[in-house]
Image (tube, coloured by chain):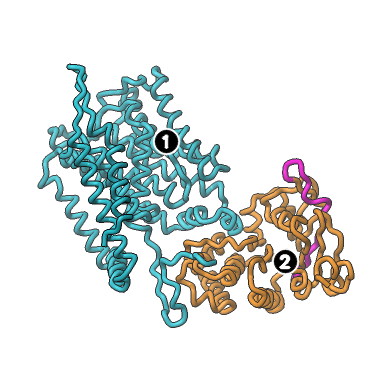
Chain colours: A cyan, B orange
């Protein structure tokens, strides 16, 4: 049943969207002829579509709220069960095998353009998993993560430029330097939490970028460093296509290593300490956990992966300059972690693939791709605020006889 | 076992504790009572190393512990049940207990202790796979105590275990504390506002007022003290 209230709300939504998208879709300036082209029909379309969309959403929500409660309940349960599927070992193993077979055979079936894009996406998987240690597991909001990525990239660029060191030599060095910079950032922020921590890490990211931009004798400034060697394969010379495929498989290897190590870390003593730190600092101290050590280890181990991904980035693009390490990179990596599901390895992987691949494939809608991208992000956060794949908790076996109320997802609302 | 010698503690320029001296002997329950803002929690924080004293020393088992980091002090055998419980809400009861044993590496003994604590708090065993945040207040308090005991402390510090709990639950918890002390000789330092109950289970007591110890002695004697009765027991 459509009420007048619904219509009014949908109408307002339509108007709001027309207003929001006005500068983007209506005005088109032709800088050569100095004319402005007003595309009013676009505005009408936006209005109509958002009006209808809003009306549909309201109707669906209204139906969910009133009547059909039982049906909804069962619907909800099936959807919960579907997500639980991921936690069943047999299913998980099957999914793991299928996806690895798909990933490994990918270059056989797709063009090198596609392989290249996927390599980039996998690089962000590594970055996301690294940041996930800091943000997802230890609960420390880090907005300057890209700094460590830059450290890795410049490590390779500079060591190659001055000492002609190869990729394989620099990869561990990049990781170590990343960790070192992680500690460097960690020390001053030990006492900070929440917003303050976010601000300081943000500044740290900017400082690193500004140094790279302005200290020309050291980093060659904004013009960057070019002609960085690609990774070697026992001295073989590879054709351009083969190089892309080779880089892809290297990246698969790095992702595999990252997943393995991060998974082990998560279930280790130190992983539990990170979780404890995220949950409650006071209790953490009461347990005899050394807060300093645990925080620093989170920063260092998180930054290690960014360092290695940075080395890889430099090797892949053969060129680095400070423009690759702006705040927006940090924001995207953070988005990957939050959108995928903080603290969940599978979630971060899916998040990275979606966030990096989506803009590429949205090129179909050309001019509006970032607009569509933003809209998709907003919708995803509304639909699944806990992330695509919520962090895996131990399964709760509920003896339904004596505590019927407590299900695993019920938060403590009435305590 | 534990000795606070002439402790002065400051928050910036404000002095919170004036010349506090407290002694706790092996196997005792000692309670520290006082009104809001008297300095009870500050005293505990000083013992656990979060707030170092400006003057005076804290001695534990013939070793000076004032000035050590909190994690070192836990390692030496002092576990604290923090005020307001501070359990880990998203971790299960079982994981909460595991974190209590964070500093220990004797896995077999840890499992034994866990079984023993489940025996002591049967409700925790029933809820062992539930996130700590879904427990009721009383259950959370029990979890906080059990978690502290997982470290096998030589001295257990409790900061207002009765806070926000129904009288019946409080009584239950105090009975368990008494049992721990009698059957396992756990030394307990109990900070409480509920002076009536605290004085009933404790051997000795200190009364804190405005950062100073104003009375001390046997709990039974203090309970009959007219000043204490008037100020803290509501008689």
The crowd level at tag 2 (other Cα within 10 Å; few <14, some 14-19, many 20+) is many
At which x and y percent is residue A322? 35, 26
Q: Which residues, given as a range, are shown in magenta?
A: B11-29
Element on which disc 1 rests: helix
Task: Name the element at disc 2.
Answer: strand
| Residue indicated by mark 1 | A177
Q: Nearer the viewer, residue B14 or B100?
A: B14
Q: Mark 1 lies on which chain?
A: A
Kindly report the distance in space between the C-alpha atoms of the residues bearing marks 2 and 1: 48 Å
User: Mark 2, mark 1: which one is toward the viewer?
Assistant: 2
Q: Is the magenta stretch mostly helix, strand or loop?
A: strand
Examine the image and state in which quarter residue A144 appears: top left
Q: Quadrant location of residue A45?
A: top left
In magenta stretch: residue A113: no
The residue wearing badge 2 is B190
Residue at the image point whose x is 30% and y is 69% from the top: A72
Q: Which of B228 and B180 is in front in this view?
A: B228
Residue at 85 percent across and 70 percent down: it is: B229
Residue at the (60%, 63%) spot, across then down: B85
The one nearer the camera, A381 or A247, is A381
Residue extending furthest toward the front: A4
Residue B15 included in the magenta stretch of the image: yes
């Amino acid at each position: 049943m459509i009420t007048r209230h619904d219509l009014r709300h949908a109408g307002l939504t339509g108007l709001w969207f027309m207003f929001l998208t006005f500068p983007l879709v209506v005005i088109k300036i032709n800088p050569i002829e100095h004319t402005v082209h007003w595309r009013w029909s676009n505005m009408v379309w936006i209005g109509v579509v958002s009006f209808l969309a809003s009306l549909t959403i309201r109707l669906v929500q209204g139906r969910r709220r009133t009547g059909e409660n039982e049906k909804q309940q069962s619907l909800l349960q099936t959807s919960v069960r579907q997500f639980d599927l991921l936690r069943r070992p047999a299913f998980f193993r099957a999914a793991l095998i299928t996806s690895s077979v798909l990933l490994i055979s990918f270059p056989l079936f797709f063009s090198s353009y596609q392989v290249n894009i996927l390599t980039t996406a996998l690089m962000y998987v590594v970055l996301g998993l690294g940041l996930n240690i800091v943000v997802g597991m230890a609960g420390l909001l880090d907005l300057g993560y890209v700094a460590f990525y830059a450290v890795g990239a410049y490590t390779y660029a500079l060591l190659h430029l001055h000492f002609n060191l190869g990729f394989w030599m620099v990869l561990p060095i990049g990781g170590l330097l990343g960790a070192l910079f992680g500690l460097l950032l960690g020390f001053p922020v030990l006492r900070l939490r929440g917003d303050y921590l976010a601000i300081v890490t943000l500044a740290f990211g900017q400082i690193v970028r500004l140094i790279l931009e302005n200290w020309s004798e050291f980093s060659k400034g904004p013009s960057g460093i070019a002609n960085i060697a690609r990774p070697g394969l026992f001295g073989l010379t590879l054709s351009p296509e083969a190089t892309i495929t080779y880089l892809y498989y290297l990246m698969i290897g790095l992702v595999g290593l990252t997943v393995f190590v991060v998974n082990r870390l998560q279930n280790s003593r130190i992983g539990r300490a990170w979780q404890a730190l995220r949950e409650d600092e006071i209790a953490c101290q009461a347990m005899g956990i050394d807060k300093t050590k645990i925080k620093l280890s989170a920063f260092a181990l998180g930054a290690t992966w960014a360092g290695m991904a940075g080395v890889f980035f430099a090797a892949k693009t053969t060129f680095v300059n400070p423009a690759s390490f702006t705040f927006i990179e940090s924001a995207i990596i953070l988005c990957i972690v939050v959108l995928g599901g903080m603290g969940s390895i599978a979630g971060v992987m899916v998040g990275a693939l979606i966030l990096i691949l989506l803009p590429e494939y949205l090129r179909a809608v050309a001019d509006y791709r970032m607009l569509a991208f933003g809209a998709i992000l907003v919708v995803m956060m509304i639909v699944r605020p806990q992330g695509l794949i919520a962090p895996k908790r131990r399964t709760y076996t509920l003896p339904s006889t004596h505590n019927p109320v407590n299900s695993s997802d019920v938060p403590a609302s009435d305590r | 076992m534990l000795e606070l010698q002439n402790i002065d503690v400051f928050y910036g320029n404000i002095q919170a504790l004036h010349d506090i001296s407290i002694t706790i002997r092996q196997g005792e329950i000692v309670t520290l009572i006082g009104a809001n803002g008297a300095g009870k929690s500050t005293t505990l924080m000083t013992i656990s190393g979060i707030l170092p004293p400006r003057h005076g020393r804290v001695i534990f088992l013939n070793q000076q512990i004032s000035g050590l980091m909190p994690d070192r002090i836990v390692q030496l055998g002092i576990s604290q049940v923090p005020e307001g419980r501070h359990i880990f809400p998203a971790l299960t009861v079982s994981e909460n207990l595991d974190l209590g044993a964070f500093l220990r590496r004797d896995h077999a003994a840890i499992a034994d202790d866990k079984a023993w604590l489940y025996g002591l708090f049967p409700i925790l065993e029933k809820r062992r796979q539930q996130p700590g945040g879904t427990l009721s207040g009383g259950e959370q308090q029990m979890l906080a105590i059990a978690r502290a005991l997982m470290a096998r402390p030589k001295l257990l510090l409790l900061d207002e275990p009765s806070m926000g709990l129904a009288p019946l639950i409080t009584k239950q918890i105090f009975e368990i504390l008494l049992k721990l002390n009698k059957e396992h000789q756990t030394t307990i330092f109990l900070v409480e506002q509920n002076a009536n109950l605290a004085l009933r289970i404790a051997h000795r007591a200190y009364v804190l007022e405005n950062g100073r110890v104003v009375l001390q002695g046997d709990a039974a004697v203090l309970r009959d003290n007219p000043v204490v009765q008037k100020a803290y027991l509501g008689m």
